[in-house]
Structures are given as structure tokens and as C-alpha cells.
Amino acid sequence: MTRNVLIVDDEENIRLGIRVMLEREYPGAYRYFSAEDGEEALQLLSEESFDIMMTDIRMPVMDGITLIERVQQLEHRPVVVIISGYDDFEYAKQAIRYEVRDYLLKPIVRSELFQTFSRLEQALKREQEIGGMLSKATQREQDYQQNEMYYILMNADIAGAEVSERLNRAGLQELQAGYFILLIQETGANGRTDGGGVLYSRIHEFVHTEEYHFLDKEGRSLVVIRDGQRLVELAEYLGQDRLVSCQTGISECMVRAEDFKAAYAQALKALRYFFLTSSTGVIRYSQIKDKPRDFEIPTEQIVKIGNMLGTGRDQEMKLLLSQVLDYRRILQYDISYIEQISRHINERIFDKAFNIYGKEAADIIKVYRQIGDLYNSPHFQDYYHGVENLLDRMNDFIKGIKSAHLNQKEMEAALQFIEQNYDRSDFNLTMVSNHVSFNYSYFSSAFKEYTGMSFIQYIKKLRLAKAKELLEISNDKVYEISAKVGFENPKHFNKLFREAEGISPLEYRMAAGLKQSPSVLRSPKEDHQE
């Protein structure tokens, strides 16, 4: 089934970029439409039925929030995803009121975009199946209840009586009689987890009228059950299903509606312990709540690992990592122990290295975006190997840079090559790094360290210096000198010269005291170029 997707953004390159990424990942799955503001989008929505709408927030004519409000009045409403360059929770809170399914920050990350569309596809298919069984009124009631859940769980400012009031308004007042919250996720063969289409259907078949089943923001099944015996029955029911392999975290029994958020937090914490066990089944919060928290983070060892990067002490570094990520020790403590270790590894090793080497380590940064979040790894061993791999890559990268820094002979050869070829308009850093047989990224960083400036800054400075020499000793016209020192465009040369010297090339020539004919000092053509 081909779905219609509407992309609303006032930047054309954003609209095209999203479309290209989706077309490559899902060829033939979607028909794409685009609009540059909310008003144009509404016109398209009145003419065509859309399944998915992605919209920016800040746009001219009509902004994204206004557009989303107007969409709620349509008979056929697309699912909405916000794309924005502003990480502003106020926007997210407003968006939740209007059933927004996700909130992506610019620049759009390919993997996050695909994860969002994967979740949307599952949800749309599920809604189609369920829609055939539920009346519109019932469906709207469930949608409203789920949106209230989203709002309560995502808004840190809501607590106590307001939580209870919102739950009552959504028709969940029965929670005052006592309840458990369950978070359930399906595990795949690769260890990855999600809400799972089959799992969702199985749970929906199980729950009674006075029980509730939703999806949380991460696509996990959130189940509210009031009877302890029903917990056992659900675990047995799912355990007997050969098509479903899942993990369940269960809160303690709560007797107040205002404790809903606390119950969710308990269920989530219990669920996270599957990161350490690599198994399926059930973990209750009561099983893990008393795990000791009197731990000390091995900060000293973590700092040492960061200091050893690029020093050649690879085995010692790996030994320290095994001590920091000691699995037996981690199992003894509360899950916050490994969470804090992960944070310290990020801050004291990887962030520190990236602050030093920056964009030259772009390929490694992509790996860091995955491993930097502990729970992006299905299990502890995946996380351990991911950190080890990232350390190896960063270690090799820094060793390469240090090797380049120490190799003065090759750097001098590079500068000589630049001196011989600076006048080529197509001259670039790749040519130089190839000439001295250095990796492009390594050489870029080494060159900056050796010269104190980037390659672009260096070549510009060199060309302007050569131009000044020619202005002083030759009778060449300015545009001829521009070409001789490697500038393709005389106007660009004039602009850079003014920025560097504060005067034009002709003014520099006259200031140098050269006695030349007026035709040499200024020609009509040069007047036009300046």
C-alpha cells in the first residue's frame, strides 16, 4: 500500500533531503508532497488525503503549531511528526496535545528518521486493524486517553493532584482502587526491542474493559492492570505464545492516581535490568528496588584510559576498561551504577577527545552517536564491545595524528609541494595528502597543528603574499596577477585582498611607490572588476 506523505518546511533543501533519504530506504512505499508554510500545506490537505505529515515549527505565513491545530478539524487527519531546529520542550508539550507522534531535531539524522517511519508504519497498520473492530467513538476515547498519558509522562512539571485530575478527565478514575503498570517490549533475534505488532495484538486481546493498554513514546506497550492475579495470567499468556518473545517490567501496586508517573518510572527501571540479563521474562520493581547505591564511580581509571589514547599502551588501556566495566561488580549495584559509568566514559574520554580533534574525527563521531547512549545497545555485552571498538578507532586515529605531527620531513615535503603548486586554481588538500601519502583526515589535523592554521587559511595567505610580490615588482594587471597566484575570480581576489590588507590591490601597488604608466595603474577593465 502506497501512503501519502506531506513534508512542510520553509527550507527547500530540508524538504528535498528528507524525501531523498526516505526514497532510498523505502522505494515505492510513499508518494511525496511538499509545502513551504502552513497555509500551503492546508491547501494540499483540503485537496488530498495524507497518511503522514512532517512539519517544521517556525515558518512564515502560518507556523507549525497553528497548522497542527487546524489539522485537528479535518475529517481525515494524518499522523504528525515535528521537525525543528529548536530543542524546545514548550513546543513538544503543545504538540502532545495534538497527537503528534514524534519530534525530530534538525539536522535530521538518517537512522532517527528511519526509526520514526518504522514506528509510524507499525502504528498505522495497527490502527487499520483495530479500526475495523472499534467504533469511532471508542477509538477517539482511546486516542484521548493515550495522549493524556503522553502528556503526563513527558511533562516533568505535572505532579500530584494534576496527574489525578488528568487521569480522571480521560476516564481512568478507577486507578484509585489500586493498580500496577507494566512496560512490555518485544525482543528480536538481533536483541533489538520494540513494541512489536504481534505483541501489541496479543496484549490487546488479553486486556479486559477495566484495564488499559497504550504505547509509550518509545513504542513499548504500557499496560495498566488492577489485579495481581491478572499479572500472573498475562505473563503465562505471553510465555505460551511461540510468536512472541518479550521482556516485561512491573511496578509495585499503587493506590493513588497521582502516583501514576512514579509507577511508570518503576516499571521502566525494572525493564532496564534486561540490559544486564540478556533474557526474556518478567522483572518486578520489588526485585531490584533495594539494590545498593553506595558505589563509587571508577573515575581515576576512566581518566587514565582517556590519557592513554594514542600512546601505544593498548593492552594496558584494555585492561583498565575491563576493570571499569566489570560485569560481576555492575550486577551487584543499582542500574544507576552502569548508567553513571557510561556518562563518565562519554564525558571524560570521548567528549574530551572530540573537543580536541573536532571535525577531523567525523567518521568516529557517527559511531559515538550510537554507543554514547547506553540503551542504544540491546545488552551489556553489546555496549562493552561498542565502547571497546570506539576506543580502538579513536586510539588509531590519535596515533595517526601524533605520527603525522612527529614526521617533520613529510610535512616539509608537503609545504614544498604547496609552494610549487599554489598557483593552480584547482589545488586542494587531497592533492597534498596524496603527495605525502597521508590519510586525508590525519593530514588535515597534522597540517593545522604544524602550521597553526587550516589548509584553506594557509593557501589564502600564501597566494596573497605572492600577489603582493607581483604587485610590487611586475607590470601585470591585477586580473593577471589574480590568475597567476591561483584565483579563478578576480573579484574574489580583490575582496580577499581588501579584507587582509585594508586596501585594494591597486592602492597597494601605488602605496609601494612603483612608477608605472596610468594605463598600468588602472585600466577600464580593472575599474569594472573592482
Image: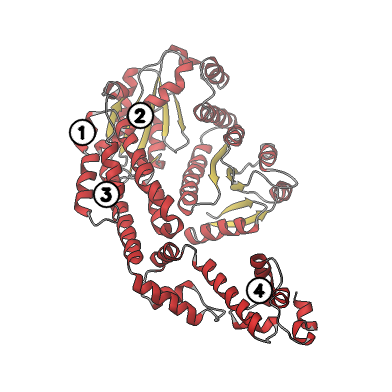
Query: How many numbered marks are there?
Result: 4
SS label for mark 1: helix
Q: Earlier in the sequence, mark 3 or mark 4?
A: 3
Q: Residue 191 vs residue 425: left or right?
A: left
In front: 173, or 468? 468
Instruction: Indicate the amino acid at tag 3.
Output: His
What residue sits 33% from the left and 69% below the top? 407
Instruction: Indicate the amino acid at tag 1.
Output: Arg
Residue 310 at what x, y percent from top left? Answer: 29, 56
Residue 162 position by quadrant? top right
Q: Earlier in the sequence, mark 2 or mark 4?
A: 2
Say the numbered circle drawn on residue 329: 1
Residue 514 at what x, y percent from top left? Answer: 70, 82
SS label for mark 2: helix
Residue at image mark 3: 385
Instruction: Indicate the amino acid at tag 4.
Output: Phe
Q: Quadrant of the C terminus?
A: bottom right
